[in-house]
Image (cartoon, helix red, strand yellow):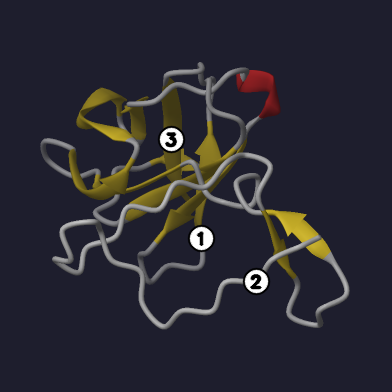
Amino acid sequence: MSSQLNVDTIVDKAGSGGTNVKVGNTSTYVSDGGGVTQNLVQGLAKAWCKINGTGTPAINDSFNCSGSITDNGNGDYSIGITSAFSNVSNIVAVGMEFENSTSSAIAIGSSSTSSLRLKSFDNGNASDREHLGFLVHGDLA
């Protein structure tokens, strides 16, 4: 027999208003149309990072990324991943460049389970950019 819990707010035991909800990797959610269920944990981004790649490269904001960047040369950066992925072959990473340019491109270079390499180009040439970012999906270790 199944049960249903109807509440307006979940708070911690102390009643301070904060919530700590743990979701297992078998948790599902119902699609917008209501006909399909999906695995909640598999659908979440496991890491993302917004960086400034000019001058001394720096992380502006991030999730699951270390606090420093390795500058591998013009337009070429390595960013550490705090909680490693289980297998680098099974990750999907997407890069973005936020400049106002139609000739720019981003490439995700050779990566490992604990770091991601981001490369930026302008007119086919490696180029430092002020506003770069990436998003990674995959299984954490």
Return the mark for residue 86: none
Q: Is residue 19 visible?
A: yes
Q: Residue at the location (34% across, 37% down)? A: 64
Q: Nearer the viewer, residue 25 or 88?
A: 25
Q: Nearer the viewer, mark 1 or mark 3?
A: 3
Q: Residue at the location (57% across, 41% down)? A: 24
Disc 2 is placed on an element classified as loop
Left or right: residue 110 versus residue 65 is right
How far apart, in angstroms, are the residues tagged by discs 1 and 2?
Answer: 53 Å
* Dot 2 amino acid type: Gln
Single out the residue that lies furthest toward the right: 35
Query: Sequence order check: which comes first, mark 1 or mark 2?
Result: 2
* Dot 3 amino acid type: Leu
Single out the residue that lies furthest toward the front: 1
Q: Nearer the viewer, residue 134 or 105?
A: 134
Q: Nearer the viewer, residue 5 or 84?
A: 5
Callout 1–callout 3 Cβ contact below 8 Å: no
Q: Which residue is mark 1?
A: 103
Estimate the x, y position of residue 80 in percent, counting from the top left. 33, 25
Disc 1 is placed on an element classified as loop
Q: Nearer the viewer, mark 1 or mark 2?
A: 2
Q: Which residue is mark 3?
A: 118
Q: Residue at the location (37% across, 64% down)? A: 98
Disc 3 is placed on an element classified as strand
* Dot 1 amino acid type: Ser
Other-residue count near label 2 (Cα within 10 Å), few / some / many at <14 / 14–19 / ≥20: few
Q: Which residue is mark 2?
A: 4
From the viewer's perspective, is residue 139 above or below residue 88? Answer: below
Quadrant assignment for the N terminus? bottom right
Estimate the x, y position of residue 23 in percent, counting from the top left. 52, 47
Other-residue count near label 3 (Cα within 10 Å), few / some / many at <14 / 14–19 / ≥20: many
How far apart, in angstroms, are the residues tagged by discs 1 and 3?
Answer: 17 Å
